[in-house]
Amino acid sequence: MKSFGKMTVASIALLALAGCSSNGGGGSESGGGSTLETIEEEGTVTVGFANERPYAYQEADGTITGQSVEIARAIFEEMGVEELEGSVVDFDSLISGLNSRNFDAVTAGMYITPERCENAAFGEPEYQIGIGIATQAGNPNDINSYEDIAANPDLTVAVMSGAIEREYMLSNGVAENQIQQVNDISAVITALDTGRVDAITMTDLTLQTAMQDQETENIEIVEDVEQPIVDGEEVIGYGAAVFHPDDQDLLERYNEILAEFKESGRLLELMEPFGFTEANLPGDITTEELCAG
């Protein structure tokens, strides 16, 4: 598996603060052609990733990898763009950074929702996935769903800031004052491990990976979680890469290659090393349908 060049935490911070001023994320703003033309000419693309295993994460040596990272890398390589400059940022900074032209694209655990579609242009779905819940060992409060949390106002739950699970919980009756938002997955796990909250939630694969990484003995993953119901339907999240609304040519080219990967089976090959299976393939649903709600 090819990995990206080493990046220190300091260099990542500087890149985010500087707004990637070398190309501004959009070729049209620097007086050149479109973003697609610029990245093809320069052979470099700047992508923002959320630090969320297994979608995207930084290894101890500074390399960035993950399911979303490797899909993006492979697709841009098919465009002839050999160098991917990756930045790991807080999840809730992805779309704002994209629209500020800090990045040419963003991805990693980014679900397609009608609200997000109003602020950015999503590629076609790359995977589907459900939610996971973890509690203190033994599940002392018998939590198996968001409705169980809502039914007991004394219970609290931690979630990563900007994550769609917060909206799912609110739709299932969980009160605002029951929800604690934190910056990253590690902080979510710590909140439960130290007893500050009674439960945590995130996508099921993220939860499984996070538990393996932190190896806590005080927490357990809830088996057979009841998926949330929103507007009368069971909610399944569909994730995709995201582009600036003005970069339709880049979006269309990305989607063309993604469709080829789906047809050939390469998409599944790229996802399998990170715990994804055939059941996580997105099927026939489209971004247009998901954006419409």
Image (spheres, rainbow, N blue to C red):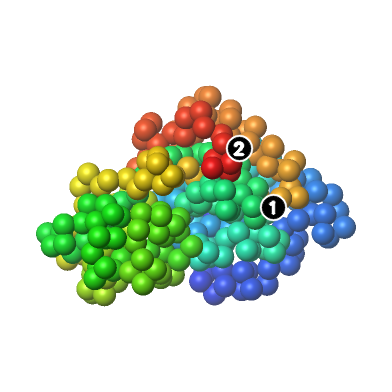
| x, y percent for residue 233 | 40, 40
Q: Residue at x 64, y 73 (%)?
A: 17
Q: Which of 223 and 94 is in front in this view?
A: 223
The relative height of residue 134 versus residue 274 in the rendered view (above or below) is below
State the residue position of label 1. 244
Left or right placement of residue 96 versus residue 154 in this view: right
| Rendered image: mark on residue 288 | 2
**CA–CA distance in space, label 1 to label 2:** 16 Å
Q: Residue furthest right?
A: 31
Q: Which of marks 1 and 2 is in front?
A: 2
Type of amino acid under label 2: Glu
| Rendered image: mark on residue 119 | none
Q: Residue at x 31, y 51 (%)?
A: 132
Q: Nearer the viewer, residue 134 or 1?
A: 134
Type of amino acid under label 1: His
Q: Which of 265 and 97 is in front in this view?
A: 97
